C-alpha cells in the first residue's frame, strides 16, 4: 500500500464509513455513494448484511445431512462416550487382576531369574506386561477399532491390514516402552524422595522427542506419506502459507483411504520436522474451497504456536500427575503393599498400580484435556476463516466431518466430550464470519 498524505486519509475514512452504512441503499438504487470515483461499483457492492441470516444459513447447511446419516453419526459419536467409560473400567479391572492375583509379582520374579542386570529386568518385565495386557485387552480393542468402525461404514481396511497395524504398534510399544519404563524406574530408584519431579521431567523430554520424530519416522510406518504434486491444489495452499509467514515448500499427502473413509488434515512435528498434511480422502472428496479452508485451519495451529502451547500445558498436567502419583502410590503401598507382595515404589511389580492410578487421573481429567484441545481448535477455525476467506468451504468441510461427529450437542456434552468445536459451532462461526464480511465495503 502506498503512503497517503494525511490530508487525504480523513476523506478516505469518511467515505469508507459512508459506504459501509449506505451500501444497502446504494446497491438498491445503483447510485454511487460518497465522492465520485471512490464509490464501490454496483457489481462489487456487498449484498445487504441485514438480508444474510446467520441462523438460517447455519440451519441450511445442517439440513444437507440426511436424517438417516445424522442418526447414524450421532449414534456413533454418543457410543464413543460410553466407550471412554468402558475402556477405563475394563482397563482398571485388568490392572487390578494383575495386582490381586499376584501376576505382576510373578512377572517380576521371572525377570529377576532371567538376568541380574536391573535395567534389563525392568525391560523383561515390561515385555511380559505388554504381552498380557495386549492379549487380555484384545477383545475390546478388536470391537472398538475394527468391528464397530465397519458397522458404521467408516472403515475400509481388511482384518489383515488392521491386525498388521496393531502388531506394528505393539512392537514399537515393546521397544520404546522398555527403554522409557526402565529409564523411569531407574529415576525412581535413584531419587527416592524427589523422583516425581525428575519423572515428570523425563516424561516431558520423551514427549518432545516423540513429537519431533513422529512425522518422519512413525507416521510413515502406518500410512504412505508423499509430497502432494497437483499444482492446482498446492499453489493456493503454498501461497496462503507464504502470506502467513509459514516456511513450507511442500504439502504432504497422507494415504488413508486403504484404512478408512475419514477426511482429515493435521500439523505434526515441530522445528525442522513440522509439516502440514492432508489425507487422500479429503483430496478425493472435497472441493478446492473446502481444502483451502481446512489447510488454513491447520496453518492456524502452526502460526498460533499450538504445538508449543500444548507442550507447556502438558508439562503442567504431567507435573500434577506425578505429584498425585507420589502421594497415591504411597497411600496404597502403606496399606496393601505387603499383601500385594510389592516391595516399594522402586519395584517393577508396582507398574500395574501406577498405570491404574494414572488412568483414574486422566479419566477424571477428560473434560479438561478435551477443553484444552478444543480451545485451540476454535482459535485455528478463526484463523482459518481469516486466512482463507472461505466461510462456505469451512461450512462444507464441517458437513463432511459429520460422518463421524455429532453436529449439534448440548453445551455440557460439548464441554465434556468434544476435542473439537461441534459442527454446529463451526458452521455458525463460518456464517457469522461471512455476515461480518458481507457488511464490509471490501467484500468480494
Ligand atoms: Zn485443528
Image (spheres, grey):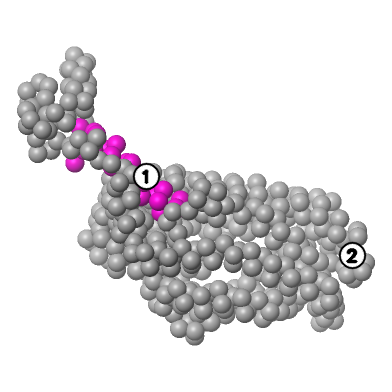
Residue 306 in sight in this render: no
Quadrant (top left, top right, bottom left, bottom right) of the N terminus: top left
First of labels 2, 1 by sequence position? 2
Residue visible at 84% across and 61% down in the picture: 345
Secondary structure under the numbered disc 2 in the rendered image? helix
On the image, the x and y values in percent for residue 363 come to 66, 58
Judging depth in this view, the residue of 73 and 348 nearest the camera is: 73
Residue visible at 49% across and 63% down in the picture: 77
Q: Of discs 2 and 1, which sits in the foreground?
A: 1
Query: Was residue 429 drawn as part of the magenta stretch in this picture?
Result: yes
Picture disc at residue 357: none
Judging depth in this view, the residue of 228 and 80 nearest the camera is: 80
Residue behind mark 2:
337
* The CB of the residue at mark 2 lies under 8 Å from ligand 1: no
Query: Was residue 97 drawn as part of the magenta stretch in this picture?
Result: no
Q: Which residues are drawn in magenta?
A: 420-444
Residue visible at 65% across and 49% down in the picture: 317
Q: Main secondary structure of the magenta part?
A: helix
Residue visible at 36% across and 64% down in the picture: 67
Secondary structure under the numbered disc 1 in the rendered image? helix
Would you call the spot at circle 1 few (<14 residues within 10 Å), some (14-19), or many (20 or more)?
A: many
Amino acid at each position: 500500500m502506498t503512503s497517503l498524505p494525511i490530508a487525504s486519509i480523513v476523506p478516505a475514512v469518511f467515505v469508507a464509513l459512508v459506504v459501509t452504512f449506505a451500501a444497502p441503499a446504494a446497491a438498491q438504487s445503483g447510485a454511487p455513494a460518497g465522492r465520485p470515483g471512490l464509490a464501490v461499483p454496483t457489481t462489487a457492492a456487498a449484498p445487504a448484511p441485514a438480508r444474510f441470516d446467520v441462523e438460517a444459513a447455519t440451519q441450511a447447511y445442517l439440513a444437507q445431512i440426511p436424517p438417516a446419516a445424522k442418526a447414524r453419526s450421532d449414534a456413533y459419536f454418543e457410543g464413543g462416550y460410553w466407550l471412554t467409560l468402558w475402556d477405563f473400567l475394563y482397563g482398571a479391572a485388568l490392572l487390578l487382576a494383575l495386582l490381586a492375583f499376584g501376576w505382576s509379582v510373578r512377572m517380576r520374579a521371572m525377570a529377576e531369574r532371567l538376568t541380574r542386570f536391573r535395567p534389563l529386568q525392568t525391560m523383561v518385565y515390561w515385555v511380559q506386561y505388554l504381552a498380557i495386557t495386549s492379549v487380555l485387552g484384545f477383545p475390546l480393542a478388536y470391537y472398538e477399532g475394527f468391528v464397530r468402525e465397519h458397522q458404521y461404514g467408516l472403515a475400509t481396511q481388511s482384518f489383515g491390514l488392521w491386525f498388521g497395524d496393531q502388531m506394528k504398534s505393539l512392537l514399537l510399544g515393546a521397544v520404546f516402552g522398555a527403554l522409557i519404563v526402565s529409564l523411569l524406574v531407574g529415576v525412581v530408584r535413584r531419587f527416592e524422595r524427589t523422583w516425581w519431579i525428575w519423572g515428570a521431567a523425563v516424561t516431558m523430554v520423551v514427549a518432545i522427542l516423540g513429537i519431533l520424530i513422529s512425522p518422519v519416522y512413525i507416521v510413515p510406518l502406518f500410512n504412505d506419506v508423499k509430497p502432494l504434486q497437483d499444482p492446482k491444489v498446492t499453489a493456493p495452499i503454498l501461497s496462503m502459507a507464504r502470506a502467513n509467514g509459514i516456511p513450507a515448500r511442500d504439502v504432504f499427502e497422507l494415504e488413508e483411504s486403504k484404512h478408512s473413509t475419514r477426511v482429515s488434515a493435521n500439523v505434526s512435528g515441530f522445528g525442522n520436522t513440522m509439516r502440514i498434511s492432508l489425507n487422500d480422502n479429503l483430496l478425493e472428496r472435497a472441493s478446492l474451497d473446502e481444502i483451502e479452508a481446512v489447510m488454513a485451519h491447520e496453518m492456524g495451529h502452526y502460526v498460533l504456536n499450538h504445538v508449543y502451547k500444548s507442550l507447556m500445558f502438558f508439562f503442567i498436567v504431567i507435573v500434577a500427575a506425578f505429584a498425585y502419583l507420589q502421594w497415591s502410590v504411597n497411600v496404597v503401598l502403606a496399606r496393601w503393599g505387603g499383601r500385594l507382595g510389592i516391595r516399594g515404589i522402586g519395584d517393577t511389580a508396582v507398574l500395574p498400580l501406577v498405570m491404574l492410578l494414572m488412568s483414574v487421573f486422566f479419566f477424571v481429567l477428560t473434560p479438561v484435556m478435551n477443553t484444552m484441545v478444543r480451545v485451540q481448535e476454535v482459535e485455528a477455525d478463526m484463523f482459518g476463516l481469516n486466512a482463507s476467506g472461505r466461510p462456505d468451504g469451512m461450512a462444507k468441510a464441517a458437513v463432511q466431518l459429520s460422518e463421524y461427529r455429532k453436529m449439534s450437542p448440548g453445551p455440557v456434552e460439548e464441554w465434556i466430550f468434544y476435542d473439537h468445536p461441534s459442527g454446529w459451532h463451526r458452521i455458525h462461526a463460518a456464517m457469522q464470519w461471512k455476515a461480518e464480511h458481507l457488511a464490509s465495503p471490501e467484500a468480494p
